[in-house]
Image: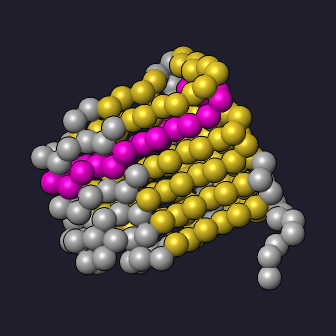
């Protein structure tokens, strides 16, 4: 049956959700979605097939603080890493939150797509890392692309958006489509490779 009204979803206190495997789609849909308290969603691929998709969809806001979502193709994988899509009115990443994808081998890393009808804010640092949206390659596979679409994009207080290569594979591209304003202070956007 169709859901008439979605409720809030919150991952707290070191919650660990492992959606590793091949194929399929892991989809979370709520009114507001919060990932906090060093909680993690993880998707690693070690097989021959692609990992599929991770979709977070909120009718209002998505807030991720500390740790976050990690998805990659491992060295032995022949299938591509998962793609991550985040959709909401407002998306906030803070306090060392990480959306981290890529590849460690010959398979391609997955792409990151963040779409907000209002604003995307990526800000601050945590106890371990800067708040970060990243795709990278440490192998021969393509690192994965990053696409951010919103009315307003804010990258503040040491936060970073980067697509990088640390090996023979090509790094991905970073595409930003902000129809009203882009504000960058402290760090910024890097596409290397």
Relative height, residue 75 to residue 93 (above, below): below
Relative to residue 59, is residue 153 drawn left or right? left
160 or 25: nearer the eye? 25
Any magenta on residue 28? Answer: no
Residue 85: which quarter of the image?
A: bottom right
- The residue furthest right is 5
Residue 47 x, y percent position in the rendering: 29, 78
Q: Is residue 37 visible?
A: no
Residue 34 x, y percent position in the rendering: 72, 54
Relative height, residue 14 to residue 68 (above, below): below
Numbered disc total: 0
* Residue segment shown in magenta: 129-157
- Residue shown at 73% from the left, 43% from the top: 89
Residue 7: which quarter of the image?
A: bottom right
54 or 2: nearer the eye? 2
Q: Quadrant of the N terminus?
A: bottom right
- The residue furthest bottom is 1
Q: Quadrant of the C terminus?
A: top left
Any magenta on residue 138? Answer: yes
- Residue shown at 44% from the left, 59% from the top: 83
Relative to residue 118, is residue 166 drawn left or right? left
- Residue shown at 42% from the left, 27% from the top: 189
Q: Is residue 59 visible?
A: yes
Relative height, residue 138 to residue 125 (above, below): below
């Amino acid at each position: 049956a169709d859901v008439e009204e979605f409720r809030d979803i919150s991952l707290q206190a070191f919650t660990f959700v492992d959606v590793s495997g091949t194929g399929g789609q892991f989809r979370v849909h709520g009114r507001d979605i919060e990932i906090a308290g060093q909680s993690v969603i993880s998707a690693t691929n070690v097989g021959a097939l692609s990992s599929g998709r991770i979709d977070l969809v909120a009718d209002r806001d998505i807030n991720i603080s500390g740790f976050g979502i990690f998805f990659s193709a491992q060295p032995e994988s022949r299938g591509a890493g998962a793609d991550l899509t985040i959709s909401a009115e407002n998306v906030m990443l803070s306090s060392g939150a990480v959306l981290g994808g890529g590849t460690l081998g010959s398979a391609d890393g997955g792409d990151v797509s963040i779409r907000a009808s209002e604003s995307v804010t990526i800000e601050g640092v945590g106890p371990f890392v800067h708040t970060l949206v990243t795709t990278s390659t440490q192998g021969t596979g393509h690192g994965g692309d990053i696409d951010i679409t919103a009315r307003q994009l804010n990258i503040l207080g040491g936060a970073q958006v980067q697509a990088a290569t640390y090996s023979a594979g090509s790094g991905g591209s970073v595409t930003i489509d902000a129809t009203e304003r882009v504000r960058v202070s402290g760090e910024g956007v890097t596409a290397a490779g």
